[in-house]
Image: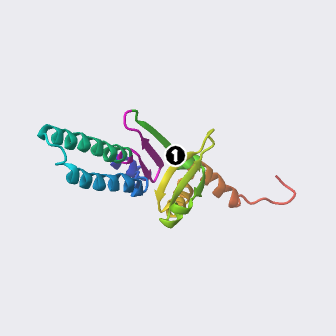
Amino acid sequence: MSLEFAEQGVASERIVARLRPHARVLFWPSLILIAGAGALAYFSRTFDEEWQNLLLVGAGSAVLALIWLIPLLRWLASRTVITTRRIVIRRGLSTRTRQELLHSRGYDITVRQRALQSLFRSGDVLINSGLEHPVVLRDVPGAEVVQGALHDLMEQSMNPIAARRQRDASHPNDETTVWGSR
């Protein structure tokens, strides 16, 4: 099927970038996991009864695993794929949301950086496509590079009909007009 599109002169869609939010959101859960594992090892023999020690280690391990696993799964469930034709945004653990924006439709791109984000060269990319609320790609690594790439992709995927009209309007007609006659 892609061969048919190539023969017709339509370029196939290629993936330009795959993005996730910055991985620093996993810093605190990972630090809690390491400190909690150390604390569990230290306090694992505090009770006289063996079942109490096993209960402490089991319950503590389950709590630590949830504290670390839930943010990891949320981070893994949020991703953005930028292709040569569109932006595909996927979010959600239990309820999956998929949103697509075509480059040919045109949109406005804004980068917003907080202090910590500018330190890590990440930021929020706001894409205003004329909807009520802009689409926000939260905490994207290399936000300014993403903004530049989206501008380039949007410019490249202009509507071919509009591009042809613009090209035709800029070139004079080949018809020769004689003054005084029609």
Tell me residue 76's x, y (percent).
35, 47
Q: Is residue 182 above or below residue 66?
A: below
The residue lying furthest to the right in this view is 180
Does residue 149 appear anywhere in the picture? no
Q: Which residue is mark 1?
A: 102
What residue is shown at x 23% (from left), y 50% (from top)? 40
Colour logic:
rainbow
Question: Would residue 182 be visible to someone looking at this image?
Answer: yes
User: Residue 173: which quarter of the image?
Assistant: bottom right
Q: Splitting the image into 4 quarters, where does residue 52 fall?
A: top left
Near mark 1 (Cα within 10 A), the count class, few <14, some 14-19 or many ≥20, is: some
**Left or right, 53 with reference to 140:** left
Q: Which residues are magenta?
A: 75-94
Give above or below for 98 relative to 19: above
Q: Residue at x 52, y 46 (%)?
A: 102
Q: Secondary structure at mark 1?
A: strand
What type is the residue that disc 1 sits on? Leu
Is 88 magenta? The answer is yes
**How far from the left and from the top, in percent, is residue 85?**
47, 50
Viewer-proximal residue, 23 or 160? 23
Query: Seen from this angle, which residue lies furthest top?
Result: 95
> Which residue is at the front of the view, 111 or 27?
27
Locate the N terminus and report the quarter of the image it occupies.
Answer: top left
Q: Residue 115, percent across and down?
A: 56, 62
The answer to whether 63 appears left or right of 92 in the picture is left
57 left or right of 115 in image: left
The verdict on residue 93 being magenta is yes
Number of numbered markers: 1
Q: Which residue is nearer to you in this view: 143 or 173?
A: 143
